[in-house]
Image: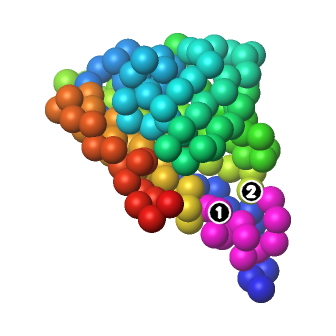
Amino acid sequence: MITLEKVPVVKAEMLIRKPVKEVFEALVNPEITTKFWFTKSSGRLEQGKHIKWEWEMFDVSDTLYVKELQENESILIEWPDGTEDRWMFTAKEDIGTVVTVINSGFTGEGDEMVTRAMDSVGGYTMVLCAIKALLEHDICLNVVLDSKPME
């Protein structure tokens, strides 16, 4: 068993060579997000709303809560397990947008938290790569679907 002094906090980050407005819209608008992350959504992300996301290929869904949403700046989502994702969008003049995802609030024993944190950083890195491919090159990578090929 691993004993931790601090609860893990995960950070994934990617430069996407598109304006902040376009990158932000890709995450709040399920018509776009379903092209690279989940397959179905109960609606657009809006502050104070509960939104159901589905990954039909895995027969899995989650209902998340949008705690904060600052247009073109940040989104704070709370998942049913109590973890939170803070998505931040930083414009880089004449280059694009740096998207930073910070996932925190892991609970459980040390080993369990470390495993969940490692899975999380890998998952968010895949999602950021998928957003980048879609927005910059109009390519659907299917990385979420293909991340569990034996299931």
Q: Looking at this view, name the residue that lies furthest to the bottom.
A: 1
Which mark, by number, is residue 76? none
Q: Is residue 114 magenta?
A: yes
Against 90, residue 127 (above or below) is below
Callout 1 crowding tier (Cα within 10 Å): few <14, some 14–19, many ≥20: some
Tell me which residue sits at (78%, 47%) in the image.
81
Q: Amino acid at mark 2?
A: Phe
Mark 1, secondary structure of its residue: helix
| Crowd band around label 2 with a 10 angstrom C-alpha radius: few (<14), some (14–19), many (20+) | many
Image position of 112 (left or right of 147): right
Q: How far across and down, in percent of the image, does residue 104 sit? A: 68, 50
| Quadrant for the N terminus in the image | bottom right
Tags 1 and 2 in contact by the CB under 8 Å rule?
A: yes
Q: Main secondary structure of the magenta part?
A: helix
Inspect the image, locate mark 1, and give the three-letter code of the amino acid beneath it.
Arg
Residue sticking out furthest to the right: 108
Viewer-side residue, 109 vs 69: 109
Q: Position of residue 56 (x, y in %)?
A: 54, 38
Residue denoted by label 2? 106
User: x%, y% of residue 121?
Assistant: 51, 57
Q: Which residues are magenta?
A: 107-117
Q: Which residue is mark 1?
A: 116
Distance Cα–Cα, label 1 vs label 2 = 8 Å
Q: Is residue 31 visible?
A: yes
Q: Reading the chain from its start, which is encountered first: label 1 or label 2?
A: 2
In this rendering, the answer to whether 107 lies above or below 104 is below
Q: Quadrant of residue 77?
A: top right
